Amino acid sequence: MRSLLHPLRGGGLAVALATLVTTGFGLLAAGTAPAHAQGSTLNQLAQAHGRYFGSATDNSELNDSAYTAVLGSEFGSITPGNSMKWDTTEPSQGQFNFSGGDAIVQFAQAHNQQVRGHNLVWHSQLPSWVSSLPSSQVQAAMENHITKEAGHYKGEVYAWDVVNEPFNDDGTYRTDAFYNAMGKDYIADALRTAHAADPGAKLYINDYNIDGTGAKADAMYQLASDLKKQGVPLDGIGFQGHLAVQYSFPSNMQQNLQRFADLGLDVAFTELDVRMELPADSAKLAAQADYYRQVTDACLAVTRCVGITVWDFDDKYSWVPSTFSGQGAADLYDENLQTKPAYTAVQTALGGGGGTDTTPPSAPSGLAVSGTTSSSVSLKWSASTDDVGVTGYDVYRGSTKVGSTTSTSYTDSGLSASTTYSYTVKAKDAAGNVSAASGAVTATTAASGGGTPGTGAVKVQYKNNDSAPTDNQIKPGLRVVNTGSDPVDLSKVTIRYYFTGDGGSSTFNAWCDYAAVGCSNVTQKVVALSSPKSGADHYVEVGFTSGAGTLAAGANTGDIQNRISKSDWSNFSESDDYSYATNTAYADATKVTVYVNGTLASGIEP
Ligand code: XIL
């Protein structure tokens, strides 16, 4: 076959120049975005950054002219989805068939594209004759397969995925025919054999679930660094990039790519797609766009990230639906070859699309607590709007980002019991613009093993009027706040402050020292808990007579100064009392409870 020079080596410049000339960019230094990128293809945009943008394809798809029109123009690299795999190229030992792969190479050459060869050694799509060989014959069969196939395509593929998917997800080696026969040394042997057959091809190890940091990426890193130290001809690591919106985006992607690059290796996304549970909807498509954008950004941020290949570009020919039941819509174009938000996101990330979107979404509104447990807080809010489209929300606890979601609700878990947290939410769009923060909302987790806080329209605030926690009196200052939008009849409201009697008499006196609503309108009584709790065997219940009137929306009762003693005036030990706190100015008190008509409105019972 006609020899195609290697793009990004000598011949790549010729290919790149040809494309640049036809699009009129002039010659651009790597890392420089074109000034007028509108109308450029993804590959032209990528080339302006010194990268390629490619797609997988398959032989049957080459008969679809609408499809090949896009394949041949939009992409600068193609990878055969199946026709260079072992079960196609050497279905029986020594019987080689390269016709499918040759057709793909021909298409590439006709469209000025480079080819990524995929793949030489893989546990899957491996004909059964290989796995049935006695282990003493596997090495020779592997070396022969590599020599014949890489030899056949010598000079015609830019890179080879020499070894595909050598690891299990936990980072241990996959025990396939090759590993069982040769141990991990089969990898070095395969690379050396491929190098001998085609010294000009970039040689890769390729795998999935190594896109972010984790055990599997660590294992790949260890292997790559060992191989480099040993002088094995390894040029790059392929990150397949089979992502899904229902899983979180891989962690630390850019840093992960960078550490491989720092070993002196090229890195590339080789099989990018972002699947979702069907049916697709606008939120999932927006999240997908954001994932594609993040991958593109990560590659552009790492100098040695040489390119991105999508594992086919349209949903019509995606491998996802037949592999992941109920999932699909993973590609840049839909089944009718219409571009999706993901396409625009990649285009924008590459600096194209007629200018960058710099308008952030509106701030989320109506942030509210929809539930709490002793270890979690659930939030909901109203959707933001954006000139292009909201892709998701980041949830902040204080100033810490605790999570992201594409929906308008979120549950923050792993929290401490009986603790008050403050939350805000920000909206994002596909270009990475972030909105202003929503209004803050506070939420208090339930006591561990205790009740859940009330969600009524009043709350209680407390201050400690007693600087002597071991004397013979307890002096809580209390006031009720109407947090709702209607007036509250105070005669229906009661407050409970919980304490322990601490020995001595079990007869108590409680009274009012001062109340803004008048002590004559306030009642106190001490009640013993039928089942004492830690820090609480009694509570003082503060109530109101009808003379206290109503509490307007937003108003509070003002100061109510209470005092409790025992009939024998023996001392208390207040510091471990359930409701005790040391603040001397009024503050929300989750361990003092307030009731309307006997129903818990706010606070947490012990
Ligand atoms: C897939 C092909 O796209 C399908 O057509 C085929 O049925 C199965 O293999 N990781 C790889 C690719 O390295 O070779 C796989 O391709 C997708 C997962």
Image: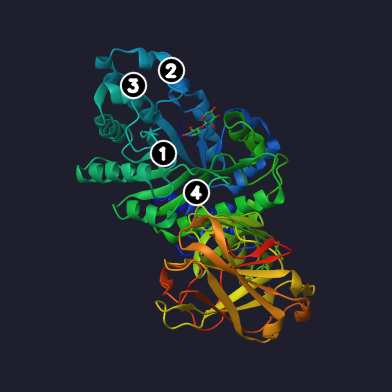
Of 374 and 505, nearer the camera is: 505
Dot label at residue 76: none
**Residue 307 coordinates in the image, percent (x, y):** 47, 50
Q: How many marks?
A: 4
Q: What label does residue 207 carry, if any?
A: 1
Q: Say what amino acid the circle numbered 3 marks.
A: Ala
- What residue sits right under mark 4 in the picture? 308
Distance of label 4 from label 2 (alpha carbons): 29 Å
Q: Secondary structure at mark 1?
A: strand
Looking at the picture, tell me which residue is in the foreground, 157 or 571. 571
The kind of residue on which mark 4 rests is Ile
Q: Earlier in the sequence, mark 4 or mark 1?
A: 1
- Depth-wise, is mark 1 or mark 2 nearer the camera? 1
Query: In terms of sequence position, does the residue under pointer 3 or pointer 2 come before the other?
Result: 2
Give the answer, above or below, for where 197 lies relative to 287. above
Q: Earlier in the sequence, mark 1 or mark 2?
A: 2
Where is mark 3, residue-wise? 177
